[in-house]
Amino acid sequence: MEKLHISCDGGDYDILIAPEHPEEALALPGGKLLVCDSNVAKLHRAWAEKLTAPADTFVFPAGEKAKNADTLLAICRRAAQLKLDRGATFVALGGGVTGDLTGFAAAIYLRGVEVMQIPTTLLAMVDSSVGGKTAIDIPEGKNLVGAFHQPCRVVIEPRLLATLPKRELGNGLAEVVKTAVLGDAQLFELLESNARRLFDAPLPEDLYAEIILRCCRVKSAVVAADAHEHGCRAFLNYGHTFGHALELLSGFRLAHGEGVAIGMVLAAKLAVRLGVCEAELAARQLELLRALGLPTLVPAGIDPRACLDAMRGDKKARNGRVVLILPEAIGKVRAVGDVPPEIIADFLREVFA
Ligand SMILES: NC(=O)c1ccc[n+]([C@@H]2O[C@H](COP(=O)([O-])OP(=O)(O)OC[C@H]3O[C@@H](n4cnc5c(N)ncnc54)[C@H](O)[C@@H]3O)[C@@H](O)[C@H]2O)c1
Ligand SMILES: [Zn+2]
């Protein structure tokens, strides 16, 4: 078992990875409401119910579509019907959708109860379950309504990944590469030397445990330094400014991690162009992403102008100014907010051709 302790503004909690005694790791006082989506309910609900003994389990239809105000309020109403009080804990068993929804419900039910995260996708294990960001989508955009609400505990069981579809595993691996480039050169090497094993059956659980530990370490260090996203937390956005725009313009045919993979390729190319990093970095990253089976080319039919507009409209742009996270070396990135839009536009025209 590995244990990480997080101390940040708004939270003080443990991340337990592959605990030897899951029944102890998952035991918490007070009434519990377990929340999971319909896919996870079929696969892992019985295990989680046995270990957490919830008052009830709330199951919602799997998919990003359910990450909305209706589901959010339905979770709160179920808690109220169960008469759960301020000492209650909501337990999020699932991917980022479940974690974001349940975390937000916990932030607002009775003005705040605890939430425990039990992530079941690689993306949730290495990214969304740690850091306390919670949100729902509204018709005007994704994640536009939410709150910072740190979990009281995160319990990660890498063996739950065995049931995850390959494409979802790939999505998570894109975030792992992101984390390696922004803060852990050794993790990058670990991925390079094990890329082919990562999709093996049975899944190499120990290798995943090591990867998850390293990612949580980087993410928690960044969050501890900047829980409310005023400064270096933006580094976690490496590959995401290009990636979000491509996801959107592909009509969401590109999954999030796939957009991020192509986004990292573009960010590294631009960094080489601007003299921020060596060409070798971009080449190594490209090779790793390919070895992991992730897309690295902008899909045909996406207009570079529309891409720049989408980047300027991104939630994280400030006054329409795009802040780009560019790699300096493997393990080190820099935020650059002063790249003139014309330079980005020329670059996009070239790489999209
Ligand atoms: N809060 C944050 O900091 C943060 C960070 C990154 C992403 N996010 C959010 O996370 C969401 C994406 O997360 P995701 O990719 O985990 O999506 P998801 O929760 O929809 O899970 C992806 C799919 O995998 C299925 N699944 C989950 N665990 C499984 C398992 N063990 N076996 C088989 N199937 C399983 C789900 O039912 C779903 O169909 C987005 O809404 C995004 O905005 C939040
Ligand atoms: Zn992401």
Image (cartoon, rainbow, N blue to C red):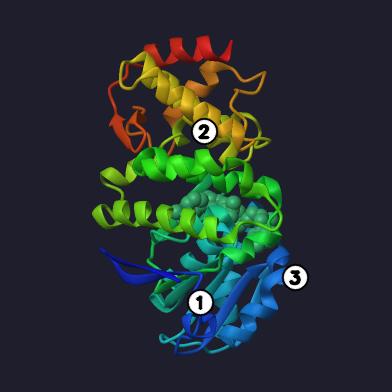
Which quadrant: the N terminus? bottom left
Q: Earlier in the sequence, mark 3 or mark 2?
A: 3
Where does label 1 land, which residue?
90
The quadrant of the rendered image in which ligand 1 is seen is bottom right
Whether residue 158 sits left or right of residue 126 in the image: it is right
Mark 3 residue crowding within 10 angstroms, few (<14) / some (14–19) / many (20+):
few
Whether residue 197 sits left or right of residue 114 in the image: it is right
Amino acid identity at mark 3: Lys
Residue in view at x 75 percent, y 70 percent? 42
Q: Earlier in the sequence, mark 1 or mark 3?
A: 3
Q: Is residue 110 above or below residue 249?
A: below
Where does label 2 land, which residue?
243
Circle number at residue 42:
3
- Mark 2 C-beta to ligand 2 under 8 Å: yes
Q: Closer to the camera, 120 or 24?
A: 24
Q: Is residue 295 above or below residue 186?
A: above
- Residue 312 in which image quadrant: top left
Mark 2 residue crowding within 10 angstroms, few (<14) / some (14–19) / many (20+):
many
Q: Earlier in the sequence, mark 2 or mark 1?
A: 1
Q: Gap in Å between the C-alphas at discs 1 and 3?
A: 19 Å
Circle number at residue 124:
none
Q: Secondary structure at mark 1?
A: strand
- Mark 3 C-beta to ligand 1 under 8 Å: no
Q: Gap in Å between the C-alphas at discs 2 and 1?
A: 32 Å
